[in-house]
Image (tube, rainbow, N blue to C red):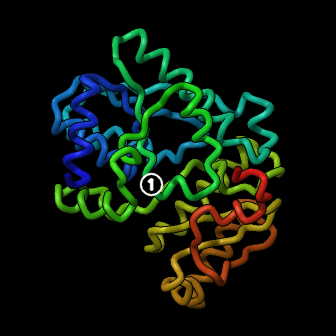
Amino acid sequence: MDKLAQLINILKDMESALLSYSGGADSTFLLKAMHLTNIRTLAVTVNSEITPYSDFMLAKKTVEEFGIDHMVIKTDEISDEDFLKNSPDRCFICKNIRFGILRDIALSKGYRFVLDGSNLDDTIDYRPGRKAAEKYNVRSPLIEAGFTKQDIREWSKHFGLSTWDRPSSPCLASRFPYGQRITKDLLKRVERAEDFIKSLGFTNVRVRDHSGVARIEVDEDKIDRVLVPQTRKKISEHLRKLGYLYISLDLDGYMRGSLNREVGAEYFT
């Protein structure tokens, strides 16, 4: 049995499910699979200070195209002092809040399962949010069916999904090294910095905030474009206006979860 057939069977057995829907490639592909099965489906999207606004708007637009029931909820992670401290367990704290809310919605509206779009590649990185998923019995059908990120992109392209090549877009809190306190203003600054760089034609961008130092990551083959004098000057001037004292470019290029290099091995057990 191929992976898609296995995924369809897993979903059909559920009969009804609530999907934590971000609008990214993974959750959109899973939403497509749920749509194919005709099981009773509710997509729930979180609107939060740590969610890039462009991601939120894309999620709303995509669900409308599917014609699937959609709910938007507001979460307030930045009112949680433990979250703001930004410990290596920050993602657990966030997901613990969100999955608790999603579980309650599913129970109140009669959905049998809560799902997320985690894929097989997510199991090899530091992902404390997985512990929250286990706590609330959130299922990850893409992992259960053995889908990697590459599988998802290939099948998404096959189905004509606009998200097939969309870069990953984790929450804005992931731009801060563990231990550096997060604030609403800093989240907004990071978002504005990334939006500006994207407006110059870069699609995969991270601005890591190191206490006033902006460390820019773009795909390795795009580094030379950043260094073009006119582009470099525009980026530097704009980020200084946002309040960054120093602007740097990571010569290794974009690396998923690059700040996890600071996490000790004990967190991977």
Q: Secondary structure at mark 1?
A: helix
Left or right of 251? Residue 202 is left
Q: Give residue 107's position: percent from left, percent from top.
A: 42, 12
Q: Which residue is mark 1?
A: 120
Q: Nearer the viewer, residue 43 or 230?
A: 43
User: Within 10 Å of the Cα at label 1, are there few (<14), some (14-19), or many (20+) other Cα atoms?
Assistant: some
- Give coordinates of residue 178: x percent, y percent: 78, 53
Horizontal side, residue 238 vs residue 100: left or right: right
Residue drawn at the location 57% of the way across and 48% of the way down: 171
Numbered marks: total: 1
Depicted 41 relative to depicted 54: above or below:
above
Q: Amino acid at mark 1?
A: Leu
**In the image, 219: left or right of 96?**
left
Q: Is residue 237 left or right of residue 55?
A: right
Q: Position of residue 199 (x, y in %)?
A: 46, 67
Task: Give the quadrant of residue 241.
Answer: bottom right
- Foreground pick, 129 / 141: 141
Return the residue nearer the eye: 90 or 46.
90
